[in-house]
Amino acid sequence: MPVKACVFDAYGTLFDVAAAARAAAAEPGAERLAALWPKLAEIWRLKQLQYTWLRAVTGDHADFWAVTADGLDVAMEACGLAGDAALRARLLALYRELEAYPEVAEMLAALKAAGRTTAILSNGSPEMLDAAVANAGLADLLDAVISVEEVGVFKPHASVYALVERRLGASPAETLFVSSNGWDACCGAAFGFRTLWVNRAGDPMDRLPGRPAHVARDLSGVPALATAL
């Protein structure tokens, strides 16, 4: 069955989640952060994801912006930066304007030129996603930006993945789902999507019920893969 829709996770897949800490560390007066930013970015992302999973299990939902701020607070404390309100505000502001990976715009344009539906399916809140998409200049290259806030639970809950067919009219078999998160790619595959894991870091495959059929180091090959399937 031909691929009708190409659906992308946002954070870590289209947008570089380390960009906020890296950019803040390069600003004047940020010498202390310059030595710590990789550690801060790593802990921030880990806690952000952990809190989505825990909130999905407990049913205690909060939007992704609140979870992002909570994760940053833990990361700053772990790095000895707790109490720096100005730095916290700057990091959160930069997170709203994350850089897209360099191949993203060209890749999406190629998919659109081939007549495929393009969309984001993300844990992000609508406001966060709108800001990121606008900052990266991707609005005209996306047919839909779908947030988990429509169902009030984070990925990998099946109700999130079901939003694709509801919103785009593409069945799982007609959808190429692309994520840089190994757990997301595995769970998307288990749901029934045709799935690509963008494994930029060369990480091992997660041991979960599903397994993505395709793995790549970046997004540049997505248009050719969508055509080949």
Image (tube, grey):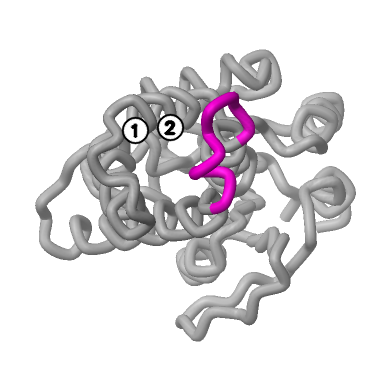
The region drawn magenta spans: 26-35
Q: Main secondary structure of the magenta part?
A: loop
Q: Is residue 20 left or right of residue 51?
A: right
Q: Which residue is mark 2?
A: 91
Q: Residue at x 32, y 59 (%)?
A: 78
Farthest bottom residue? 207
Q: Residue at x 40, y 52 (%)?
A: 44
Which picture quadrant has residue 16?
A: top right
Q: Residue at x 57, y 37 (%)?
A: 25
64 over 217 or under it: above or below: above
Q: Position of residue 221 (x, y in %)?
A: 86, 50
Residue 20 is covered by the magenta coloring: no
Q: Position of residue 85 (x, y in %)?
A: 27, 29
Which picture quadrant has residue 45?
A: bottom left
Q: Which residue is mark 1?
A: 88
Badge 1 element: helix
Of the 4 image quadrants, the one containing the N terminus is bottom right
Q: Is residue 181 left or right of residue 151?
A: right
187 over 111 or under it: above or below: below
Does the residue at mark 1 contact the one at mark 2 (Cβ under 8 Å)?
Answer: yes
Give the spatial CA distance, label 1 vs label 2: 5 Å
User: Disc 1 residue type?
Assistant: Arg
Q: Can the viewer see residue 150?
A: no
User: Disc 2 residue type?
Assistant: Leu
Q: Position of residue 92 (x, y in %)?
A: 39, 30
